Image (cartoon, grey):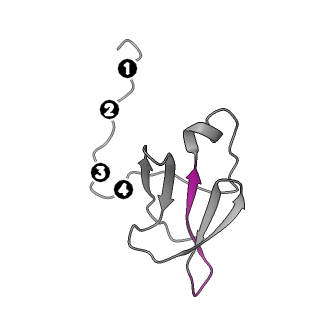
Amino acid sequence: MAASVGIFLSYDSEADILELVTSPDQPYVSHEVRHGFLVHHEPKSGAIVGFAIHHFLQDFSARPLNLPLKVSFAPAEGAERALPYDSSL
């Protein structure tokens, strides 16, 4: 079983860039794999440590963005449990 990692997500509305990284302090090099979509790699191992999506709302909100990722979701240690969704609100 692979080790789990957290994902840090940030969005810069002025530059319209969505960033997802495993650590905000992780050094990486980037490679553009599709116009406006960059993959971040750890320099020594080449391991993928994140993604950046430039022109996120402008370009990607109108068409699907399919990422070849395998993920699982679980609350982080110390995270509060979400309340059940109330559709009447």
The residue that label 1 is drawn on is: 86
- Name which residue lies at 63% across and 80% down: 46
The label on residue 83 is 2
Asked if the residue at tag 3 contacts the one at tag 1, i.e. Cβ–Cβ closer than 8 Å, the answer is no
Question: Going from the N terminus, do you reach mark 2 or mark 4 first?
Answer: 4
Asked whether disc 1 touches disc 2, contact meaning CB atoms under 8 Å apart, the reply is: yes
Secondary structure under the numbered disc 4 in the rendered image: loop
Magenta residues span 43-54
Circles 4 and 3: CB atoms closer than 8 Å: yes
Q: Secondary structure at mark 2?
A: loop
Query: Who comes first in sequence, dot 1 or dot 3?
Result: 3
Question: Which residue is rendered at x = 47% and y = 66% of the image?
Answer: 22
Tell me which amino acid carries mark 3.
Answer: Ala
Q: Are marks 4 and 1 in contact (CB under 8 Å)?
A: no
Neighbourhood count class around disc 2 (C-alpha, 10 Å): few under 14, some 14–19, many 20 upward: few
Magenta includes 71?
A: no
Q: Which residue is mark 4?
A: 76
Q: Which mark is residue 79?
A: 3
Say which amino acid is labelled 1.
Asp
